[in-house]
């Protein structure tokens, strides 16, 4: 399912950032992530420990 793939991708992204912040363009302890609505939802929810059922479509970022 696409949503499950999205959540898995978000988990992998956080693993990369945690493993080596320098590869994630870490500047002074801050990492900027630029993305769109669905991956933003997945990133925020996986960072907070929310699963798909609790997190998907619970926060929406308009693409403007």
Image: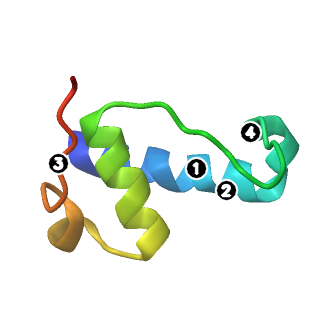
Q: Are marks 4 and 3 in contact (CB under 8 Å)?
A: no
Q: Is residue 2 in view from this perspective?
A: yes
Q: Is residue 1 in view from this perspective?
A: no
Which residue is label 3 attached to?
60
Q: Position of residue 27 (x, y in %)?
A: 81, 42
Q: Residue at x 42, y 64 (%)?
A: 46
Q: Are marks 1 and 2 in contact (CB under 8 Å)?
A: yes
The secondary structure type at the circle numbered 3 is loop
Q: CA distance from mark 3 to mark 1?
A: 21 Å
Q: Are marks 2 and 4 in contact (CB under 8 Å)?
A: no
Q: Earlier in the sequence, mark 3 or mark 1?
A: 1
Q: Identify the residue at the far top of this view.
A: 64
Which residue is label 1 attached to?
12
Describe residue 39's horizontal placement relative to residue 9 as left or right. left
Q: Quadrant of residue 62?
A: top left
Q: CA distance from mark 4 to mark 1?
A: 13 Å
Q: CA distance from mark 1 to mark 2?
A: 5 Å
Which residue is label 2 attached to?
15
Q: Earlier in the sequence, mark 2 or mark 3?
A: 2
Q: Are marks 4 and 1 in contact (CB under 8 Å)?
A: no
Q: Nearer the viewer, mark 3 or mark 1?
A: 3
Q: CA distance from mark 4 to mark 3?
A: 24 Å
Which residue is label 4 attached to?
24
């Amino acid at each position: 399912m696409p949503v499950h793939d999205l959540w898995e991708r978000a988990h992998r992204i956080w693993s990369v950032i945690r493993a080596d912040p320098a590869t994630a363009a870490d500047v002074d302890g801050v990492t900027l992530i630029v993305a769109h609505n669905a991956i933003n939802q997945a990133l925020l929810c996986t960072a907070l420990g929310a699963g798909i059922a609790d997190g998907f479509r619970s926060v929406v970022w308009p693409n403007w």
